């Protein structure tokens, strides 16, 4: 296990028409053995940040510390050795198409000077862990997307890394395959105590696997903390937008939610305690006023079921603030909805 600390990190790229600030004064602490999510829209700086974590991109300012030692203090030779402790998997797998599955996993072992027999033995162990023992002699072109990513994960584990960086590792996969890959990563985290950093633009990925998350916008961290806290009480506009996008279609039909423009809308999240009371029914009976339920769903947040609803009050209601307080008094988390639902 390894702890990652990012201190005052900035990265500026020089271009013909000027400079581009990809990262601006980023500060993060990723605990040893954690599964940490870094999320944001396209262009937020996520991939640049993860490449700075293994110094594939050298920061313009600031430091990246692995177990207390700054990567910037290493010589080139020391840095190459340090990178053996930092595995990485990518959105598009980056497999050697002319090599078999077994040889793809062996590749980093050969680079380390392992003999063929030893490399094959280790590769077979890893392919069993990722569920591909029967695909050793297959070639990447013969595999599904999920199987290719499993090969990439096995290859990343070949050097026994302490850290695994995942750059949009599930973005090219369908939801069912994504879920199976995330389950595999969680199993690897628990089995080998590897610190995992997940770079993604999907809140559903963060909800399922991560314990902590940082949200990036325009190269800056706008919010960070426990996934459960941010899901329940999002503070930044980015967090609210990503959570609403995550809830963007009906859980059963997949149909887009209709846009209804009338009274004020709020988002409520049910805790374990509040889920046992018919809160909405009692709210209507207490205030003798209808409430429109625009959306109701249950989300898995770190293995805990969280109920959420988008409610709409009647237009120009004088009871809105009192109704919000009624809900808050019963243990519900309440957030604003600033966009059409």
Image (spheres, helix red, strand yellow):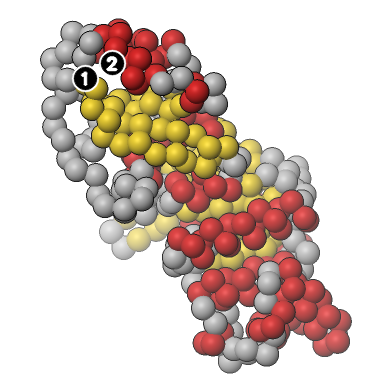
In the figure, 222 relative to 254: above or below? above
In this view of the protein, can residue 44 be seen by the observer? Answer: no
Q: Quadrant of the C terminus?
A: top left
Q: Position of residue 197 (x, y in %)?
A: 60, 51
In the figure, 61 relative to 111: above or below? above
The CA distance from mark 1 to mark 2 is 6 Å
Q: Position of residue 178 (x, y in %)?
A: 51, 61
Q: Position of residue 226 (x, y in %)?
A: 57, 33
| Residue 81: quadrant of the picture | bottom right
Give the residue at x 58% y 75%.
147
* Image disc number at residue 113: none
**Disc 1 and disc 2 in contact, CB within 8 angstroms:** yes
**Left or right: 208 in relation to 24:** right
Residue beneath label 1, please?
290
Front residue of 142 and 5: 142
Secondary element type, mark 1 = loop
Front residue of 171 and 159: 171
Give the residue at x 47% y 41%.
299
| Residue 36: quadrant of the picture | top right
Residue beneath label 2, please?
284
Neighbour class for label 1 at 10 Å: few (<14), some, many (≥20)? Answer: some
In the figure, 160 relative to 224: above or below? below
Total residue callouts: 2
**Left or right: 129 in relation to 19:** right
Front residue of 282 and 233: 282
């Amino acid at each position: 296990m390894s702890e990652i600390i990012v201190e005052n990190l900035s990265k500026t790229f020089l271009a013909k028409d000027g400079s581009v600030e990809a990262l601006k004064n980023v500060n993060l602490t990723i605990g040893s053995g954690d599964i940490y999510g870094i999320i944001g829209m396209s262009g937020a700086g996520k991939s640049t940040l993860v490449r700075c974590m293994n110094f594939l991109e050298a920061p313009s300012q600031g430091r990246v510390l692995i177990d207390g030692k700054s990567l910037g203090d290493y010589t080139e030779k020391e840095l190459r050795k340090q990178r053996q402790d930092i595995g990485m998997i990518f959105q598009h797998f980056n497999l050697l198409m002319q090599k078999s599955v077994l040889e793809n996993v062996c590749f980093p072992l050969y680079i380390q000077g392992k003999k063929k027999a030893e490399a094959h033995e280790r590769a077979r162990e890893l392919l069993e862990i990722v569920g591909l023992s029967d695909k050793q002699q297959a070639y990447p072109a013969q595999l599904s997307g999920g199987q290719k990513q499993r090969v990439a994960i096995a290859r990343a584990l070949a050097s026994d890394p302490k850290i695994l960086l995942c750059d949009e590792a599930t973005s090219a996969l369908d939801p069912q395959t994504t879920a199976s890959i995330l389950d595999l990563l969680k199993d690897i985290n628990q089995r080998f105590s590897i610190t995992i950093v997940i770079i993604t633009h999907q809140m559903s990925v963060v909800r399922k696997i991560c314990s902590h998350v940082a949200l990036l916008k325009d190269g800056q961290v706008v919010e960070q903390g426990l996934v459960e806290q941010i899901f329940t009480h999002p503070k930044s506009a980015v967090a609210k937008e990503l959570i609403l996008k995550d809830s963007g279609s009906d859980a059963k039909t997949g149909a887009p939610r209709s846009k209804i423009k009338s009274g004020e809308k709020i988002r409520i999240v049910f805790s374990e305690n509040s889920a046992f009371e018919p809160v909405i029914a009692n709210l209507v009976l207490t205030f003798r006023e209808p409430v429109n339920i625009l959306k109701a769903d249950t989300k898995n947040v770190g293995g805990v079921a969280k109920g959420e609803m988008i409610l709409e009050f009647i237009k120009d209601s004088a009871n809105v603030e009192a109704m919000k307080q009624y809900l808050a008094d019963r243990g519900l988390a309440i957030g604003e909805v600033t966009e059409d639902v």
